[in-house]
Image (cartoon, rainbow, N blue to C red):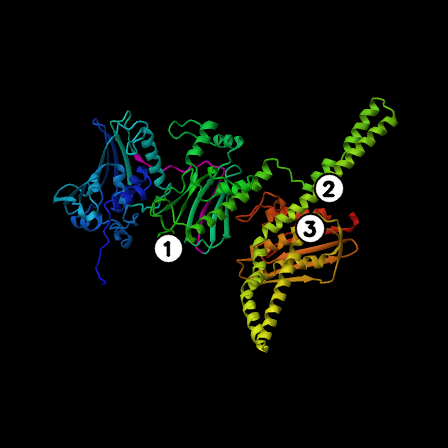
Amino acid sequence: MMQTITGKIRPSSRHLFTIGEDLIQDKFAAIMELVKNSYDADATEVTVNINRKVDDSITVTVEDNGIGMSLEDIQTKWLVPSTANKLNNRISRNGRIMQGRKGIGRYAANILGDDLLLSTITSQGESTEVYVDWSEFDKYDYLDEIDIVIETSESSKRSGTILVTSHKLDKNTEGEEDEKDWSREDIEKLIFELKKLIPPYQVINEDDSFNIFIKTQNFDEDIELVVSPFPFLEIYDYRIHGEVKETGEAILYYENQRKSSEIETIIESLSPTKCGIIKLDIRVYDRDKTAIDSLIGRGLKDEKTGKYLTNLQTRQLLNDFNGIGVYRNGFRIRPLGDPENDWLELNKRRVQNPSFRIGSNQTIGYVQIESEEISGLHEQSARDGLKKTNSYYGLISTTQEVLSLLEQRRFIYRRKTESFSKQSSVNNKLNLLSDYTLLSKNLNKVLQDFGLENSSIEKVNQLILKEEDKKQKLADELSNAIAVYQGQATLGKIIDVVMHEGRRPLHYFENQIPNLNDTIDKFLLQRDDTLRERLKKISDGVSRNSYALSELFNKLNPLATRKRNKAKVFSLTETIQDTLKIFENELKKQNIVVQISPNNNIDFYGWSQDITTIFANLIDNSLYWMKDCKDSKIINISIVENEAEIVIDYTDTGIGIPRELIQHDLIFDPEFTTKNEGSGLGLAISGEAAERNKFKLSALEHQGGAHFRLSYSKEDI
C-alpha cells in the first residue's frame, strides 16, 4: 500500500563550515569579507587587530563604527545563511552600494578561529551579543539542533560591531603549518591584500570616507597603520586610459613618457563590450635594461627613503605590483589583478608574438566595471573572480582591444627609435646566402695582390661558382618549402570558412542516407512513380552536393599542396575568382558585394597558389574589418594590363588603414597586427608570395577603406 508523507530540507551542521572553509579561499579572503561587511554597515572606519597572546593563542578582532545590528537583524539575517537581504537591498542606509550579495561573508569568521564573539550596538542603543563555539557543530547532525546564546541589553556606547575570533595554536603537529596562525609574513601579505583591495582612484563619494586600520600586538615587531591603496606609479613608459561605452564607442588617451609628455586622444569604435560601461587606466613598462634605466632616470624613487631605485629594485617593484585589477564600487574583485593571475591571457598572446604583444608582468592598472545588474558580471560563490559568462569574455575582449591600441603605438615607436632595420623578405635573405659575387670579387683582388697567376685565380673562381650553384639549389629548395608552408598557414587562417563550406554537403549526405535507404526498400516492394521521383530527387541532391564538395577541394588544393609545383602559365582572373569562391557563402552572409573588372583573362607565368595565398589573406582581412560596418560593403578588384606592367588594385569599404602604418610600411611586418587576436603573419605571407612572382604588394592611402596594389613590371623581366 502506497503511503504519502512529507519531509523537510534540513541543513547539515557542516553547512556553515562549507560556506566558510570551502567557499572563501583563505584567512586573507576571510578578513576581506569582514572588512566589506563593515563598509556595507556604513562604517567610516574598521580596525583589524591581530593579537598573539601569552597562552599560545591568536585573537583576530574586526571592529567598526557602522550602524550595528538589532536583535531582529541578528535573528532574521545574521543567523540565516545565504540570506537575500543585501540582494534585495542594494543600497545602504547612507547611500553606499552594497558589496555583499551572497549572504555568506559573515561566516568567513570560522576560518579565522575556533569560536566567535559578536558584539553589536545600534544607533538607538540596543546592544546584542552572540557567542558561537564552532566545535559544538561537530556534536550535532543538523543546524536546527544547535542552540545559539544571544544576550541583549541597552548601551550608551557608539554604534558599531565587534567580531572577535580566537584560536589555540597547535604545538603538537610537527612539520605542519597551523593555517590559523599569523606570522610576520602573513601580516605583510594581509597589508598587501588590503592595499590592493582599495582602488588607486577615488570612486567613493568625497563626503563619504572609509578607512581601514591594521594593528598587531605581542609580535616581535608590532605595527599600527592606516591602510592606503598602492599609489599609481606616475612614471611609466606607456599609458592608455579612458572609457568604453557598452556599444564599443571609446574615448581613450594614450601617453608615451619615453617620447614626450604629449597626450594623444583616441576615438575608436571597438566591439560592443557585452558588460556595460568600462573605465580603465593601464600603464605599461618595457623591462629591458635600457628601459629600466630610463625609468630610474625619469625619477623613479623609493617612496619611503626618497632614494633612486636600483635596476634590481625597479624590477622587483614591477614584479610585486604588476597586474590589471578589476574594481567595482570601490573594491577589487580578487584574485583578478594578482601578479600570478593572468586573467586577460596576456602571456598567452605574447608567446605567439613577443616583439609586438606585452606580457602581464609589464602592466600595472585597473578596469572599473558597473554593478552586476547592469554589467552582467557576477562574482563566483567561492569569491574566486567572476563567473565565466558572455559578459566576462566581453570584458576580456574589450580590455584586450584597448591594449592592442597601445601595443600598435608602442611597436611603431620602438621600430622608429631602437634602430630596427626594415625586415628583408625571406626570399632576399636566401638569395644573399647563396650569392658569392662579392666574396669572389674580394678574393680575386687579394689573390692578385699576392701575385697569383690568372690560371690559378680562374680555378679558384670555378670552385666558388660551383659552391654558389650548390647553395643556390639549396636556397631554391628552401624557398619552395617556405612557399608550401605559407600556403598551409593561409589555409589554417581560413579554416573556419573551409569547415563551414564543407559541412553543408556533409550534412546533406548525413541526413539523406536514412531517407535513401528507406525509399529504396519501399521502391523494391512497390515500384511506383512517386518513389521513383523521390529517388531521383535524392540522387540529384547527392550529385549536387558531391560536386560542391569536390569544387571546394579543388579551390583549396593550391593552399593544401605538400609539394611546390613548377611555375607555369595560368589565368590571373580565374585564380582570383576561384579564391573568391572559397569565401562565397561568408561573403553572402555579410552582404558583401564583390566587383571584378575587367573579367577577361590575363595570362601570367608564375605560381597560381601564391596568387591564391595573396587574395585569401586580403579577403579574410576584409571579412574581419567589414563585419561591423553599417554602410554598404564592397570589395572591388581592378586588373589592368598594358605593355609595361600589370596592376591589380584591391579595395574594400572597411575601416581602412591608418596613414602612419602605411607610411612606415609596418603592416607587412610579420610581427605587427591590428587585430586583437591576430598573429601578424597574413600580410607578411602575402608580401612574400607576391615577391616570388616578381609582384610588389603595397598599401595605399584610401578614403573609406583599405587599398592594396599588386604591381608587376614587364620591363624587369
Question: Which disc, if any, is residue 610?
Answer: 3
Whole-angstrom CA distance, mark 3 to mark 1, is 50 Å
> Foreground mark, 2 or 3?
2
Tags 3 and 1 in contact by the CB under 8 Å rule?
no
- Give the residue type that dot 3 points to: Asp
The crowding category of the residue bearing disc 3, from other C-alpha atoms within 10 Å (few below 14, some 14 to 19, many at least 20), is many
132, 137: nearer the viewer = 137
Q: Residue at x 20, y 51 (%)?
A: 76
Q: Earlier in the sequence, mark 2 or mark 3?
A: 2
Which sits in the foreground, 566 or 370?
A: 566
Is 631 situated left or right of 174 in this image? right
| Left or right of 90 in this view: 483 | right
Q: Residue furthest front?
A: 525
Question: Seen from this angle, which residue lies furthest left?
Answer: 153
The answer to whether residue 395 is above or below residue 639 is above
Structural distance between the alpha carbons of marks 2 and 3: 15 Å
Identify which residue, 213 or 492, lies in the foreground: 492
Mark 1 sits on what residue? 374
| Sequence-first disc among 3 and 1 | 1
Please name the amino acid that badge 2 sits on: Asp
Label 2 SS: helix
Please tell me which residue lies in front, 224 or 459. Answer: 459
In the rendered image, residue 302, in percent from the top left (x then y), is placed at 41, 29
Q: Which residue is mark 2?
A: 476
Percent of width and height locating residue 200: 38, 40
* Image height of 615 relative to 548, above or below: above
Report, in whole angstroms, how far the alpha carbon at label 1 lies from the one at label 2: 60 Å
Describe residue 104's horizontal placement relative to residue 333 as left or right.
left
Q: Which residues are magenta?
A: 226-246
What crowding class fits label 2: few (fewer than 14 Cα within 10 Å), some (14-19), or many (20 or more)? some
Label 1 environment density (alpha carbons within 10 Å; few <14, some 14–19, many ≥20): few
